Amino acid sequence: MEAGGVDSKGRQFKNAEEMWREQIGKDSDSHKRVDWYRHGVGYWQEVEASVDGVLGGYGRVNDADIKCSEAFLRTVFSELLVDGGKNHLVALDCGSGIGRVTKNLLIRYFNEVDLLEPVSHFLEAAREGLASDGSTASDGHRATNFYCTPLQDFTPEARRYDVIWIQWCIGHLTDDDFVSFFSRAKVGLKPGGFFILKENIARSGFVLDNEDCSITRSDPYFKDLFRRCGLHLYRTKDQTGFPEELFAVKMYALLTEVPKRNSSRSKSRANRPAIINSGSS
Ligand code: SAH
């Protein structure tokens, strides 16, 4: 990625390579890389297990977030899942936090949802919250597996998932781990399955957050990584209705094969929300 970036202290970087060299060093097994991930998880270990906590103090955007995600999921579903919903559907919620996305959205559409989250007190809150949710039990939909693992160490069971949902957590992964995560995760998709990535978007280049060890990437930066992953961008949509001071947020639906569009069905061809810090403008 050639565009330059900034960190939250206002420091400028020529390009992402320069930033990563400093943050994690050249050797992928370096102690710097270990520290990067330790700080990332360490940051979240201090955060309260609540909607406000996982949304960086912006719990009030929950409804707008879920509404937009649901509309996007329904669009992609109606275009890609041509079986009329007869299948037993399974999703994976990556970096699930307290299970906010599962509880408000995924559990209504999928017969089973697995949650993956490295911070144990979040995962426990998710387990408790989902167990106490009567609506999920009554329709037979359930949260099945709770994996306390970070994305960079996770390999899914082969062909288990219809959808792998990754929201507000991929910024914790280095570029190389991003690419290797998606390569492993592809194997976890059923034929015809897809990824949905929902993330904050930098206006250009990237913004490094020194406090929680994560980066916010620009849209071209993401597209460059999708190419490296061999993923095909099927559809994208912007989040609407968020406060102005937050980063823009985009949803990407990603396929492992070149999209085959069903023209009669496809109508229009044609790490949590975060404040944009002073360095990013
Ligand atoms: N996706 C959830 C939580 C967002 S908060 C939601 O939208 O409500 C960001 C989450 O990313 C936290 O739960 C944090 O613990 C998790 N996270 C941090 N580092 C991670 C890593 N390396 N792999 C997976 N998740 C990570």
Image (tube, rainbow, N blue to C red):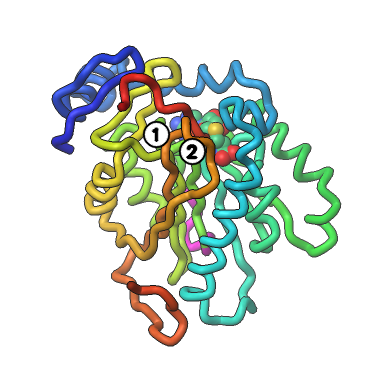
Q: In this view, does 230 lie to the left or right of 52?
A: left
Q: Hey, which residue is sitting farthest bottom in the picture?
A: 264
Q: What element carries label 1?
A: helix
- Amino acid type, callout 1: Gly
Residue type (three-letter) at the residue carrying disc 2: Trp
Residue at screen point 56% across, 54% down: 68
Q: Is mark 2 on a helix, strand or loop?
A: loop
Task: Tell me residue 76's x, y (percent).
Answer: 48, 68
Q: Residue 269 vs residue 79: left or right? A: left
- Other-residue count near label 1 (Cα within 10 Å), few / some / many at <14 / 14–19 / ≥20: many
Q: Read off the magenta span.
A: 156-162
Question: According to the image, label 2 marks what residue?
Answer: 168
Determine contact: label 1, label 2, CB under 8 Å: yes
Residue that mark 1 sits on: 171
Mark 2 Cα within 10 Å, few/some/many (few <14, many 20+)? many
Magenta region, main secondary structure? loop
Q: Where is residue 136 in the image (x, y as percent from the top left)?
A: 78, 55
Label count reads: 2
Of 141 and 1, which appears nearest the observer?
1
Q: Is residue 160 magenta?
A: yes
Q: Between residues 237 and 37, which one lies in front from this camera angle?
A: 237
Is residue 205 left or right of 129 when viewed as pictured?
left
Q: Label 1 vs label 2: CA separation?
A: 7 Å
**Image quadrant containing the C terminus:** top left
Q: Position of residue 83 (x, y in %)?
A: 56, 81
